[in-house]
């Protein structure tokens, strides 16, 4: 019998340099787009193949909220629009 090796799952969000990524629900996305008077495709893009996007199972067309820690600003929130590769 061949002993199967368990595949280790890597949680990229445990690394200190990887910011928190959250998929916005439809209501939250509409609020953000309305607040800035833009459409989703006008946000900066992030590819669906990005490891963080894959980890949270976001799909093209989703809007992500990315929360970064900053030594000067404390916390910085940015938004990204998920696109296909």
Image (tube, rainbow, N blue to C red):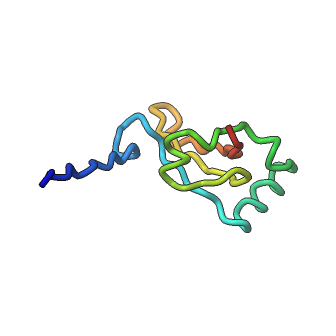
Outermost residue, bottom side: 27
Q: Nearer the viewer, residue 82 or 9?
A: 9
Q: Could you say where residue 73 lies in the image, as x and y percent from the top left?
A: 53, 36
Identity of the residue drawn at 65% across and 39% down: 46
Q: Could you say where residue 11 lies in the image, as x and y percent from the top left?
A: 36, 48
Q: Could you say where residue 62 lies in the image, as x and y percent from the top left?
A: 69, 54
User: Relative to residue 34, is residue 45 drawn left or right?
Assistant: left
Identity of the residue drawn at 55% across and 39% down: 50
Identity of the residue drawn at 67% across and 45% down: 79
Outermost residue, front side: 1
> Image quadrant for the N terminus?
bottom left
Relative to 18, is 34 above or below? below
Outermost residue, top side: 72
User: Relative to residue 62, is residue 19 drawn left or right?
Assistant: left
Relative to 48, is 17 above or below? above
**Which quadrant of the structure image shows residue 84?**
top right
User: Relative to residue 32, is residue 79 drawn left or right?
Assistant: left
> Image quadrant for the C terminus?
top right
User: Relative to residue 3, is residue 17 drawn left or right?
Assistant: right
């Amino acid at each position: 019998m061949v002993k199967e090796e368990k595949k280790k799952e890597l949680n990229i969000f445990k690394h200190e340099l990887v910011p928190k990524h959250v998929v916005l629900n439809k209501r939250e996305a509409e609020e953000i787009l309305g607040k800035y008077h833009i459409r989703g495709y006008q946000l900066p893009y992030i590819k669906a193949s990005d490891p963080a996007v894959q980890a949270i199972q976001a799909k093209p067309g989703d809007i992500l909220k990315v929360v970064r820690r900053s030594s000067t600003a404390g916390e910085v929130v940015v938004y990204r629009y998920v696109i296909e590769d």
